[in-house]
Image (tube, helix red, strand yellow):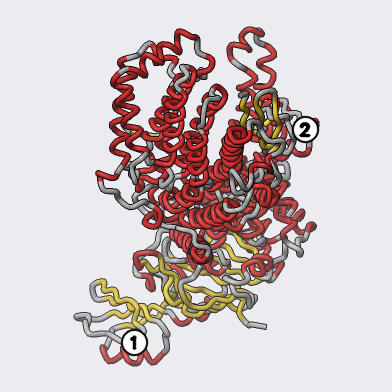
Amino acid sequence: MPNFAIETAGLTKKYARHKTAVSFLDLQVPKGSVYVFLGRNGAGKTTTIRMLMGLLQRTSGRAEVLGFNPDRQPVSIKKRVGYVADNQKMYDWMTVGETINFCSPFYPAWNKALSEDLLKRFELTKTAKVKDLSRGMNGKLALLLALSHQPELLILDDPTSGLDPVVRREFLQGIIEVIHQEAKTVFFSTHIITEAEQIADHVGVLEDGKLLLSQPLDELKNSVKQIRLIFEEKVPDDISFTGLLKKEQLGHELVLTVKDYNPEILKALSQYSPQSTEVLDLNLEDIFVSLVGREEKA
Amino acid sequence: MRTLIWKEWREQRLFFFLSVGLIILIRIVPELIPRHLIDILDIITIRIYMSCFIFPILFSLLLGVIPFTNEFIKNTKSFLLSQPVTAAKLFWVKYFSGLLFLLVIILLSYFVFGIPFGSLSPHDRWPVIYQFLPMTILYSAAFLSSLLFRNSLPAFIYTPFILIFGILLLSPFIIFLFLISPYWGLFNLLVFSSVTGMFLVLSFLTWQKAITRDISTIKTFLTTAVAIFILSLAFHSIANLATIQKINRTIQEAKEEGIKLTPEEVIPPLVPDKDNAALVYRQAFDLADRLKEKFRTEWEYMPDESKIKIEELTVTQKKDISRIMQDPEFVKLYALIEKAVNMPACRFDINYEDGPAMELPHLAKMRNLARLLAARTYILAEEKQYQKALHSAEKGLLLGDSLSKEPILISQLVRERIDITAVDSFRSVLNLYSGSNPVNNYQTIILEIDRKDKNFIKGLEGEIAISGFYRFGFEKKFNYLDYILSQRGYTQNGKSLAGDIFSKIYYSYLCVPVLKEDYAFYIRAITFLISTSNEPYFLVKNKVDKWVKNFTAIRFRVIKHIISSMNLPYLIETFREEARYNAKLNTFKLALALKIYREKHGTYPDSLTSLAPDIIPEIPPDPFTGKDYIYRKEDKGFIVYSIGENGRDDNGIHDIKQKYDDIAFKVSN
């Protein structure tokens, strides 16, 4: 049995005119993890997920989802994966009940009791028409459909995009509840960092189709630190070392963001004789901004 | 599967019920309007058009377009594809559920508009069922169109173009199917299956490979289309190679049997002007035209144009004709004919390269000359100028020989008519004249009859070597398609439609295997007819009848021999015509021999056997029976006749209306 729910090697998608959407992606999502796939809009998250679901032909590379090849065994993957697509549009002429009845026969492992339970928890009414549902309720219905067949892996592609903060929180709460109860592998793609921090135990950051990092959240937080140095006189301008992500100067103060932090770095910095040295922890948003270079609006 | 079908039904049920409502409404409305308006509006015709054409076409287009464009327009495609069901299953469910709705609506339309399907015989039901097949093709084209354009209106509008495009792709393959299909029904079925199959392959790959995997739809579609076209061309090439082999083999066999196949082999050589009777005939034709102009009133009952037989003219009319015949220009005309029939060769200026379109105006003019000579013979016999009459009739008998070298079947048939006209004209002399010693004249005429070419082989050879050669278009000088279209008035700005590039491609490339197949059949058919032409009719009659039966059956069952089918019935008839011609000449010959016998013995013999070998070397058999002609003495004269094609003794009577077909020569003197 593979150890990873999702594993890709050199996964690449090129569109016409040599536009590369995803470039040599080596992704490993451990089983049982909640993996947040972080990236700005247009970074290549949806393209990656669509390739994983067998909905998009890859240009090169290898991909496996739960040990299945998305190109050759898309149905096996879809049977075992709960998938909520980005801005998923269901048949608006169906009622909630009809939508559930339409989808359930496709899944041998469909759990009717779970579905009923989720209906209650998400406060969905069976007789309501899909076209009359709010965006939040629509997302909840999609989540219900994704969860009711008890998938081994849940792939959520920006499920909260377009939702207002209140609904987003509500929706996310729903996800957290389910994750905790079912202990599934979750692959959660988002560009909203605060969301990621709430649920993630693993993080991958994608930028321009390239994976900048992929590691457990704790490890990431331990490895990326900010070092604040205050100098009495002029701030030296020749500070440079491996792992330095960002350098910001504010008067006599120099703030360094470093990757793979270790005490040896402080030792090396002491040669510049700073008046004071302080090591600060970063939240995920700070780390993301440091890595991506620009601040993303939540 | 059931849930998918349920979804399709739910999505299309509104359209379905609206269609049913519309059909019922259009059926009911005429019942509510006054009867005289129904007659004015021709409601019955409108209903038939509605039920058989407009509704099926409309529903095919709509039902083909709706299933996929719904998913694209409402953007539900991703949701559908995220379900664990193969793209193939989604495709087939959509295709067949739409097709089922279409079938139901079409059948409903038939019933509502009063096509009494239940009361139709099983044989008549098929055409109704057949109607569903083209609609399936249209539906499949609309299905493909919806995948390409992803929007209902463009998909709807472009479906006819997709349909034409698809049929063009498969045209070479359809030619292949045309050649391998023994029955029309099978051909229709194969064409239906392959065209529908092609649209399904294109739709399926566009859906499966492109849309479900987000690959370029147009690229996938075009690649598949090119692959289909190449495959289609490959089948066409196989058909072409097979027919090339077949035609080569047929040509080889025909050559071994001595059949002439090219124009060069049959077109008669040029004749020096001084020996060429055609030039003299041309003068005679001009003179005849002048006479016609000069005696415009009398010419209305002149036998060359009038349908009235000279025997049926009034005394005054006969006198008028007699007067015309004494006109110096008529005398000159007769002199020209007399000169022409005695010349060594005759070659009219004919554009053989025009093939079946060649113009042969001289044939009608030669027939007119024959009728004028016959009239002259009759008038002279009535005026008791028997020697002159006999002389005139003899020239008439020679007139046809001027056409004997023309390798054209119609020329040979005209030659036969000219000879028969001459033979008939002799009857007036033989009936009226009982004077002294015409024996020498009769003997000369018998020799002339014996010398005559008794079959139409030359004409049949021409059918292959000239008409066939050019008709099948292997020599680019003649385009048969162009010819047919222009003959039927299909022209545009005075230019034949076949002149445009599509027709040229079709004719010079696509149809070539069919033409070759047809040509091979044509050669085999005429080779067979030529072989029978050398045998007496009664010996080969059964063989020909069997062949005709097969051919007639083939005409309805096999589709490969279109041009042959148009020409062969007329060619087969020449085989019987030849027997009739021989019977006519022989009865005349026997009549002459009987006259000679009476001159010698003072009375007609009791039996024809008395004529040989003293007067004629042997008694010719009746071509229809192989036995002796029937001979009977009557009052002062006699009758000698063939029992004709029906094989029944009709007492010497020839009356097509009564189905009496005896070929007789009766002399009452």
Q: Position of residue B133 (x, y in %)?
A: 64, 44
Total labels drawn:
2
Q: Label 2 neighbourhood size at 10 Å, few (<14), some (14-19), many (20+)?
A: few
Disc number at residue B120?
2
- Identify whether A60 is placed above or below B466: below
Q: Is residue B202 visible?
A: no
Tell me which residue sits at (41%, 47%) in the image.
B405
Tell me whether marks 1 and 2 sit on the same chain. no
Residue type indicated by callout 2 = Leu
| 1 or 2: mark nearer the eye | 2
Seen in the image, is B144 located left or right of residue A98? left
**Rendering quarter of residue B338:** top left
Q: Residue at x 23, y 81 (%)?
A: A232
Reply above or below: B632 against B480.
above
Q: Is residue A129 left or right of residue B470?
A: right
Q: Is residue A272 left or right of residue B99?
A: left
Quadrant including the C terminus of chain B: top right
Along the line of sight, which residue is nearer the eye, B630 or A170?
A: B630
Q: Quadrant of residue B528?
A: bottom right
Q: Is residue B654 visible?
A: yes
Callout 1 amino acid: Thr
Percent x, y for residue B44?
A: 65, 20
* Image position, residue B574 (x, y; %): 56, 42
Judging from the image, mark 1 belongs to the subunit labelled A
Q: Are marks 1 and 2 in contact (CB under 8 Å)?
A: no
Task: State the residue lying farthest toward the left.
Answer: A234
Q: Which residue is mark 1?
A: A242
Within 10 angstroms of label 1, few (less than 14), some, or many (20 or more) residues?
Answer: few
